[in-house]
Image: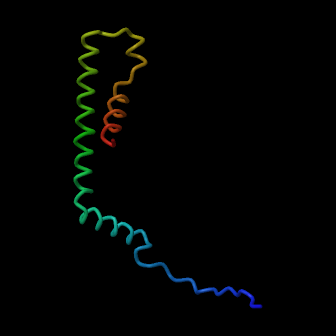
Amino acid sequence: MSTATQTHEPATPPAAHDTWPGLLRAEWTKIRSVRSTVWSLVAFMVVAIGFSLIIALVLNTDWNKTGGDAHTRLHTDPTSVMYGAGLGLGQL
C-alpha cells in the first residue's frame, strides 16, 4: 500500500499584471485594441442621450398641453424618468 503525500509548491510572487497599475494597463490595451469596445461605448452614449432627449421633449409637451394638477406634478419626477429610461434603453 502506498500513502498519499501532499507536495506544497512555494508561493509564487504576483505577476506584473496582478497589480492595480498592471490591471489598468491591461484594460487600456483592451479598450484600444478591440474596436467593438469603442463602438459600443459610442452607441451607448448616442442611444442614452437620444432617448433622454426624446423623453424630455415628450414630458415637456405633455405637461404644457395638459397642465397637470398640483398633485401629479408634485409626485412626478421627470428627471428620474429621463435618466432611468435613457440609461436603461442605452444599456439594452
Would you place residue 59 above or below residue 41 in this image?
above
Q: Position of residue 8 (x, y in %)?
A: 63, 86
**Residue shown at 28% from the left, 68% from the top:** 29
Instruction: Count the marks.
Output: 0
Q: Quadrant of residue 22?
A: bottom left
**Residue shown at 34% from the left, 10% from the top:** 68
Would you place residue 31 above or below residue 41 in this image?
below
Q: Position of residue 55 (x, y in %)?
A: 27, 27
Determine whether, in the image, residue 39 is placed left or right of residue 19. Answer: left
Would you place residue 73 above or below residue 89 in this image?
above
Nearer to us in this view, 29 or 1? 1
Q: Quadrant of residue 49?
A: top left
Q: Position of residue 87 (x, y in %)?
A: 33, 38
Question: Residue lying furthest right in this view?
Answer: 1
Task: Work out which quarter of the rendered image holds the C terminus and state it.
Answer: top left
Determine whether, in the image, residue 55 is placed left or right of residue 81. Answer: left
**Residue shown at 28% from the left, 21% from the top:** 59
Q: Position of residue 69 (x, y in %)?
A: 37, 8
**Residue shown at 23% from the left, 31% from the top:** 53
Task: Work out which quarter of the rendered image holds the N terminus and state it.
Answer: bottom right
Would you place residue 65 above or below residue 3 in this image?
above
Question: Residue lying furthest front in this view?
Answer: 1
Q: Quadrant of residue 60?
A: top left
Q: How is the image coloured?
A: rainbow
Question: Residue lying furthest bottom in this view?
Answer: 1
